[in-house]
Image (cartoon, rainbow, N blue to C red):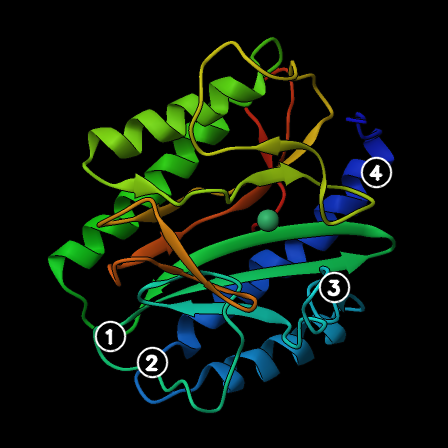
Amino acid sequence: MIYRKSPAEQEKMRAAGRVIGQLLDELARRIVPGITTWDLDAFAHDFIVSKGAKPAFKGYTIPGLEPFPGTLCTSPNSGIVHGIPSKKVVLQEGDIIGIDVGAVLDGYYGDAARTYAVGEISPDAQKLLDVTSEALRLGMAAAKPGNRVGDISHVIGSYVKAQGYHVADDLTGHGIGRQLHEEPQIPNHGNPGRGPRLQSGMALAIEPMVNIGTNRVRENGWEFFTADGSLSAHFEHTIIVTDGEPRILTQA
Ligand code: MG
């Protein structure tokens, strides 16, 4: 069921989203060569708890896997999503790193992701970040009443393809609210005019995952990588559909 959030629910989701936006801003200062993804995860855990919220991903279960151990998903370079924070992953100058984080506050969820440059990065890597973040912006702009989910999918997928890149197979955005993952699924490619119709008050997590070399993914437990080892980027916001511009919940 896709349900419209009441104004009171929207404010609770904004409170959860603000914590995430603030955290992602704080992480920008801490993502430097030499830091481990473990260190970033420890900072994120303490930050979320200090705001009275709880990490949403830690302990998340899917059949066949151990509960997710991190507060963050940390996915460097060819990592697409769901990377597990580790003392062994030391960020290097020139890396890119996708950070995905969810939090729950007063029973409502927020979910967002950014991909960061570690020091100076190559022009190719910078272009990937720019294209992926623009794909998110375009997808959010299509999230308006009267449009359908497929309009969001189509604008993301067609823009990414036109840039010569690939959206990762089988990984989608989603509705969000009282659960981390609610209906509808929001694929990153598809046909316009298809799927559920959007209405004001719907809360959506839109999240293009874009690879340079291939749409194909390689899975290793929780972690998803590009099948060809090429770079991947991920940007995500939780938004509310309104009669005007969508309201972005996951910013400071
Ligand atoms: Mg998400």
Residue most toward the front? 64
Label 1 to label 3: alpha-carbon separation: 34 Å
Residue at image location 25% in from the left, 58% down from the top: 228
Position of 197 with respect to 214 (left or right) is: right
Q: Residues within 10 Å of mark 4 (few under 14, many from 20)?
A: some
What element does badge 2 sit on? loop
Q: Earlier in the sequence, mark 1 or mark 2?
A: 2
Q: Which residue is mark 1?
A: 119
**From the image, which quarter does the C terminus lie in?**
bottom right
Q: Quadrant of residue 243?
A: top right
Tell me whether the residue at label 1 lies in contact with that at label 3, contact meaning CB atoms closer than 8 angstroms: no
Q: Name the foreground residue: 80 vs 19.
A: 80
Please give left or right for residue 68 compared with residue 28 in the image.
right
Please provide percent x and percent y for residue 44.
60, 75
The secondary element bearing badge 1 is classed as: loop
Q: Amino acid at mark 1?
A: Gly
Numbered mark located on residue 32 in the image: 2
Q: CA distance from mark 4 to mark 2?
A: 37 Å
Residue 25: where, in percent of width, then height? 49, 63
Q: Pointer 4: what residue?
A: 9
Q: Is mark 1 within 8 Å of ligand 1?
A: no
Mark 4–mark 3 distance (CA, rounded to whole Å): 25 Å
Q: Is residue 106 above or below residue 132?
A: below
Disc 3 marks which residue? 61
State the CA–CA distance, disc 4 to disc 1. Answer: 39 Å
Work out whether 58 lies above or below 12: below
> What's the residue type where badge 3 is placed?
Thr
